[in-house]
Amino acid sequence: MIGRSIAAGILALGITAAPVAAQNYPTRPITMIVPYAAGGPSDIIARLVAQSMGQTLGQTVVIENVGGAGGTTGAARAARAAPDGYTILFHHLALAAGATLYRNLTYDTINDFAPIGLINQGGFVVVSKNALETRTIAELLAHVKKVGRDITFGNAGVGSGSHMCNMMLQSALGVKFTEIPYRGTGPALNDLVGGQLDALCDQTTSSIPQIQGNRVRAYAVTSTERVAQLPDLPTLREAGIPGFEVTVWNALYAPKGTPPAIVDRLYQAMEVALKDETILKRFSDLGTALFPAGQRGPDATRARLVAEVEKWRRVIAESGFVPSN
Ligand code: MLT
């Protein structure tokens, strides 16, 4: 009888412990994994949001850049973290594309994460080093067709947004160029400014300051509409590639099993960040936009991830790209 009462007491303690943990959460700093190198577009947006979330939650949200393998290294780190709210993941379309491109993922893309919320969405911009002899998107596309593998395009690894853009460009042009992988498009952009890399399909959030500073040359954007901060740049659809679109969408995730009350605290802190005028101004200046209020919580994030896994499975199949691993 004593054994049963002790067991019942432990069970009761265990059940009551969970809500207490959520009620007191957070009691120590939180790690936000960014699956790309510091200084790139993911890092830029993540740091803006993390700083605000930390103020709201009363604990520092520390960015940990875990680059490699197109973002799957960082995603794997998050998937196996303790589901206690102290490790969250910042990721984008590459989490969805990775489900098709990596045969040996150590996580289930749809089921091993607890979605928190959708942050922002925007396009990429095709940029080159200033020394490249081309001036317009028509000239660049003609040059790529002419020289093929003699031109280098950077990417952030297989499955990254920059890689998906490159894949779609090569498929549309019917030509292969040389891709140089980086741990993020931050380092790639540095090499573009330095002239060591020829071209890059980079998120506007990272490239707009370099374009405005005339340190790289811009040609076209990958969104379906022109970008207000780059009004003279045509879309790639206007440049003659029908249906071309690469839209990045950034979201936050926790490991599967994170208590819903903790996921909600994180989501509410994200919402505070997305109402911060300083952050909204920065997003606008960098050519990126929020998702509509009321359509960016955990359920909307899961729905977007599921839809994007199917979308990229189709786009990758249509492009003829065959993953090497
Ligand atoms: C990408 O190419 O997926 C991202 O722009 C990489 C990054 O954020 O560094």
Image (cartoon, rainbow, N blue to C red):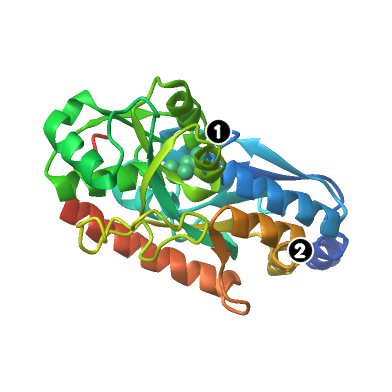
Residue 117 horizontal side relative to residue 183, left or right: right
- The residue that mark 2 highlights is 276
Q: Which of marks 1 and 2 is nearer the N terminus?
A: 1
User: Is residue 56 positioned above or below 177 on the image?
Assistant: below
Could you tell me residue 266's position as x and y percent? Answer: 72, 62
Q: Residue at x 45, y 24 (%)?
A: 191
Could you tell me residue 17's position as x and y percent? Answer: 83, 62
Q: Residue 194 carries which label?
A: none
Q: Residue at x 34, y 33 (%)?
A: 199
Residue 284 horizontal side relative to residue 168, left or right: right
User: Is residue 271 positioned above or below 175 on the image?
Assistant: below
Could you tell me residue 324's position as x and y percent? Answer: 23, 34
Hey, which residue is sitting farthest bottom in the picture? 294
Q: Nearer the viewer, residue 37 or 229?
A: 229
Q: Residues within 10 Å of mark 2 (few under 14, many from 20)?
A: few
Q: Which of marks 1 and 2 is in front?
A: 2
Tell me the quarter of the picture where residue 70 sits: top left
- The residue that mark 1 highlights is 37
Residue 279 can be seen in this image? yes
Residue 210 horizontal side relative to residue 225, left or right: right
Could you tell me residue 315's position as x and y percent? Answer: 24, 57
Tell me the quarter of the picture where residue 23 sits: bottom right
Total count of labels: 2
Tell me the quarter of the picture where residue 63 sits: top right
Q: Does the residue labelled 2 lie within 8 Å of ligand 1?
A: no
Q: Does the residue labelled 1 lie within 8 Å of ligand 1?
A: yes
* Dot 1 amino acid type: Ala
